Image: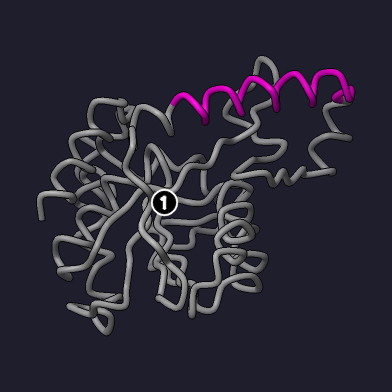
């Protein structure tokens, strides 16, 4: 019965609860909501629908430690790779392991890009306000690389919005983004899924359906 006390029922509920914190951006044509695939997209969809904003996906891949894939030693997006040297050193990861993991995740990112977009180009964020959304921040590696890559696309403003974040990841994200919004920063995170009643994996089919709905809107 503990689940009933968790802050978020599921990712859609998290997005609906996050949306009021972004109410100042509601209905603006110069604002685009970008959901990190895959888990951030349902959260982003709820925000975009609630605030009547454009929605797109942003592809980032976590570099998970061998045998402990939930522990990120870095992340990639576009042609950028960021490594958490503390984690790399602590786990004693070899350069061979790092490069092999990077190559595998780049291949997966290319597969997803082709599947999700097809011939459809990403929304142009140049001169716009981009709201980057994920379902939570643990190490913050994925969000840091996302902001770094997004900055190269020359948006006017980058807002990072997440439902929950580890206290240790907040400072680095706040330093990179123009605005950081997170209503829940627990002293101990215990994993992002610990704050959701339903933290089921988001499928490729769900991502495609969300993007198709956004395109129709």
Q: Nearer the viewer, residue 197 or 206?
A: 206
Q: In the picture provided, is 99 more to the left or to the right than 207? A: right
Residue ID at (72%, 36%) = 73
Q: Nearer the viewer, residue 202 or 117?
A: 117
For label 1, the residue is: 134
What kind of element bears circle 1? loop
Residue ID at (33%, 37%) = 119
Q: Residues within 10 Å of mark 1 (few under 14, many from 20)?
A: many
Q: Residue furthest left?
A: 217
Q: How is the image coloured?
A: one colour
Q: Where does the image place residue 1, in percent across and percent down from the top left? A: 20, 34
Answer with the quarter of the image where residue 174 lies: bottom right
Residue 64 among magenta residues: no
Q: In the picture provided, is 155 more to the left or to the right than 173? A: left
Answer with the quarter of the image where residue 131 lies: bottom left
Q: Where does the image place residue 216, in percent across and percent down from the top left? A: 10, 49
Q: Nearer the viewer, residue 206 or 127?
A: 127
Prevailing secondary structure of the magenta residues = helix
Residue ID at (27%, 84%) = 24
State how many labels appear.
1
Residue 108 among magenta residues: yes
- Relative vertical location of residue 164 with respect to residue 78 in this rendering, above or below: below
- Report the span colored magenta: 93-111
- Relative vertical location of residue 107 with respect to residue 216 in this rendering, above or below: above
Residue ID at (27%, 57%) = 55
Q: Residue furthest front?
A: 119
């Amino acid at each position: 019965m503990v689940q009933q006390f968790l802050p978020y029922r599921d990712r859609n509920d998290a997005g609906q609860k996050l949306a009021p914190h972004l109410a100042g951006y509601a209905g603006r044509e110069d604002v685009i909501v970008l959901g990190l695939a895959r888990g951030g997209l349902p959260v982003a969809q709820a925000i975009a629908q609630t605030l009547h904003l454009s929605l797109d996906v942003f592809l980032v891949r976590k570099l998970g430690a061998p045998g402990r894939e939930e522990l990120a030693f870095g992340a990639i997006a576009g042609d950028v790779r960021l490594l958490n040297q503390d984690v790399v050193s602590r786990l004693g990861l070899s350069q061979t392991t790092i490069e092999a993991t990077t190559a595998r995740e780049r291949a997966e990112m290319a597969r997803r890009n082709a599947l999700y977009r097809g011939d459809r180009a990403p929304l142009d964020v140049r001169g716009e306000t981009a709201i980057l959304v994920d379902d939570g921040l643990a190490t913050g590696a994925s969000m840091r690389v996302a902001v770094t890559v997004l900055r190269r696309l020359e948006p006017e403003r980058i807002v990072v919005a997440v439902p929950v974040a580890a206290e240790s990841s907040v400072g680095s994200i706040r330093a990179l983004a123009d605005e950081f919004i997170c209503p829940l920063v627990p002293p101990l995170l215990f994993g992002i899924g610990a704050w959701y009643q339903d933290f089921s994996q988001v499928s490729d089919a769900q991502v495609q359906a969300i993007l198709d709905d956004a395109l129709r809107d």
